[in-house]
Image: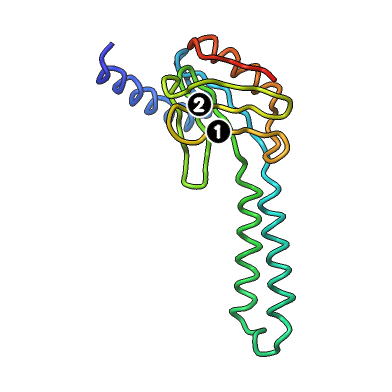
Amino acid sequence: MSRSWERKVRNNMKHLNKQRKKQGLQSVVPSAEKSDIYKGRSFIGPVLLVLLTAMYAIVIGNDEESRQSLYWVTIGLYLFLALMLFVRRPYVKVGPNYVQTRKFSGHKTLQASDIKSITASRGYVVVERHRGGNWVFSQFVNRYPTDRLAERMQAFAKQHQLPYNTK
C-alpha cells in the first residue's frame, strides 16, 4: 500500500472521528492503529520543586525588602509548576510498530526498527536503542504499572523479533 493512500485513510479517519465525537459516539479506530497506553504518576519532581520553593521562601524571605509582589509571584509560579508536573502524567503508548512516551521536550516516538532490545526486571522496563540513550520506565520514579507494561513489551518484542530479556 502506498504512503499517500495510508495518509488519505488516516486523514479521513481523523475527520470521521471528529464528526462522531460531536455526535457523542465512540471513535472508530482501524485495527492496525490500536495501541495500549500505560500511565504513571510523577511525584519526585514536584516534591523537589516544592522543597526548593520552601527553601527559597525561607532564605530570601528574611528581608522585609524582598517581600514585595515579585517575591510572591515567584513562589506562586514555582508552586504552579510543581502542580503542572504532578498533573501532567507520564505515559507509555505501545502501538503496532512503535513505542511512544512524553519527555521534557515533547512526545517522542521510537519505531520498532530503532529498538535494539527490551529488558524487563522487577520494577523496571528498559528499551535499548541503537542510537541515543535508553528509555527506562520505572515503577519507583514514575509509578508505571511495570508488570503489565513488561507483558505488553514482551508481546511487542515477539511480534517484531526483538531480543527480550528478563532479570
Is residue 131 rendered to the left or right of residue 93?
left
Image quadrant containing the C terminus: top right
Give the residue pinned by disc 1.
135
Numbered mark located on residue 99 in the image: 2
Q: Amino acid at mark 1?
A: Trp
Q: Is residue 68 above or below residue 143?
A: below
Instruction: Residue 25: give x, y in percent of width and height.
Output: 52, 25
Q: Nearer the viewer, residue 20 or 35?
A: 35
The residue at 73%/68% (across/down) is: 54
Q: CA distance from mark 2 to mark 1?
A: 10 Å
Is residue 151 rendered to the left or right of residue 93?
right
The residue at 43%/24% (across/down) is: 114
Is residue 26 rendered to the left or right of residue 45?
left
Q: Residues within 10 Å of mark 1 (few under 14, many from 20)?
A: some
Numbered mark located on residue 57 in the image: none
Instruction: Residue 41: give x, y in percent of width and height.
Output: 68, 40
Q: Residues within 10 Å of mark 2 (few under 14, many from 20)?
A: many
Image quadrant containing the N terminus: top left
Image depth: mark 2 or mark 1 in front: 1
Label 1 near label 2: C-beta < 8 Å?
yes
Instruction: Residue 90: give x, y in percent of width and height.
Output: 60, 39
